[in-house]
Amino acid sequence: MIRFGPAGIPLSCKGRTLRDGIADVHLLGLSAMEIQFIKVNPTVRPAFAEEVGKTPRELPQQLVVQVDSPGTKEDRTRPFSLDAPIQKRDLLTTLTWSLAKEHADLATTRDIARALDVELTLHAPYYVDFFGSAEARERSIRQVQWSAVLAAGLGARLVVTHLGFYGPGPRTDSADRITDVIAPLAKWVQQYSRGHVRLAVEPSGHPDVFGSREEVLGMTRKVKGLVPVLNLPHLAARERLKLETAAEYEPLVAEFRAACPSRLYAHFSGLEQYGPGEFRLTPIKRGSIRFDPLAEFLVGRDYDLTVISSSPLLEHDAMYMKLLYERALTRRWAKMQTPPAPAPRLPAAAPSRTPPGAKGPAGRPKPKPAGRAKAPKHPPVSRRPGVHRAASTRR
């Protein structure tokens, strides 16, 4: 099954809330949506006296995403629980997010999405720095963990993130260092969500940002639980690809599908390329890469795939991709239902004219063609003595 959806709340949505966006996605005939967790406004405060004994999930008008106990050594590889009672002197980290005010809001949104069959994923904040200072790295890890808390509450299956700029030194050293950071983070996401949420890494179109095709696929092979994102515009910009035929899409889809344990996740939009690392995402009809050959490629294969529109038109291009896919599917179905054309009838062979007396193929005289049957002759009149022919009485 192939799902299509926008990267964010649809532009045509009037309510501008997460629930309204999911409802609009369903009404538009789409079945996927990537939630954008872009702005992060955390607040760290001690637990109030009336909150002691309650669980973070039960607090009204409080979206708690982290609980720290002072006096104990912090372990970033060990996830906390939203169902554990709050103790005295605990430090609570809450978020101010326009799409949800408390964990009850997340649960309600999750139920609506499941009822409408809309698959949810969540994109973590775009600005991360895993190669910078210890403070910047710690902040980036925290933001991905908070994204996982929100994704688990919303019933999303993926937390999508970039990995930031390369660090100093050779790029092979940067790959080893980022693997040491991402491996425990991917394990934390799986443990917290009990296997329902996975960390997904997408490639980057800028050559100065970590995330080439080889780096992303190599990391997913090393880190258990890490999922690659097939971001086609970014790959086309980084590798200067045209992507105008199905043959160009086939190796990309095959490589990422082989590295993905379950459903493949992809981004698509139009693309305008200028210089190395200079590009911008555009509507599909204005971009240099085409979705038509990808649709023709997908209809011939039984893939579980989610395609997210990351173009400026969001849901409009998501619907356009779905339309192109359905057209390709209709053409293939009509071709399968059309009966094959009958074989052309060969002209009858002309009878051979063999001269009289000639022998046939077996060495025997060729039979003469049957002509008109001759009338049999009357037997001769007996001439016995004493028997005379009667004289004719006619004069």
Image (cartoon, rainbow, N blue to C red):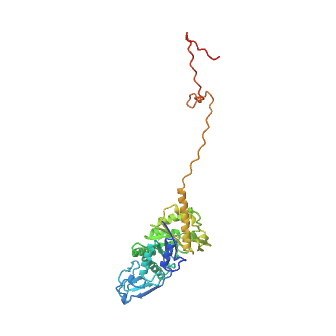
In the figure, residue 269 lies in which quadrant?
A: bottom right
Vertical position of residue 68 compared to residue 196: above or below: below
Q: Kindly give the residue lying farthest to the bottom in the view shown.
A: 49
In the figure, residue 79 lies in which quadrant?
A: bottom left
- The answer to whether residue 338 of the structure is visible from this angle is yes
Q: Residue at x 61, y 42 (%)?
A: 347
Picture quarter with the C terminus: top right
In-front residue for pair 105/241: 105
How far across and down, in percent of the image, does residue 195 sit? 40, 72
In-front residue for pair 368/122: 368
* Left or right: 73, with 13 as reference point: left
Q: Kindly give the residue lying farthest to the right in the view shown.
A: 395
How far across and down, in percent of the image, does residue 56 sit? 39, 83
- The answer to whether residue 173 of the structure is visible from this angle is no
How far across and down, in percent of the image, does residue 228 sit? 48, 70
Figure disc tally: 0
In the figure, residue 394 lies in which quadrant?
A: top right
How far across and down, in percent of the image, does residue 209 sit? 54, 75
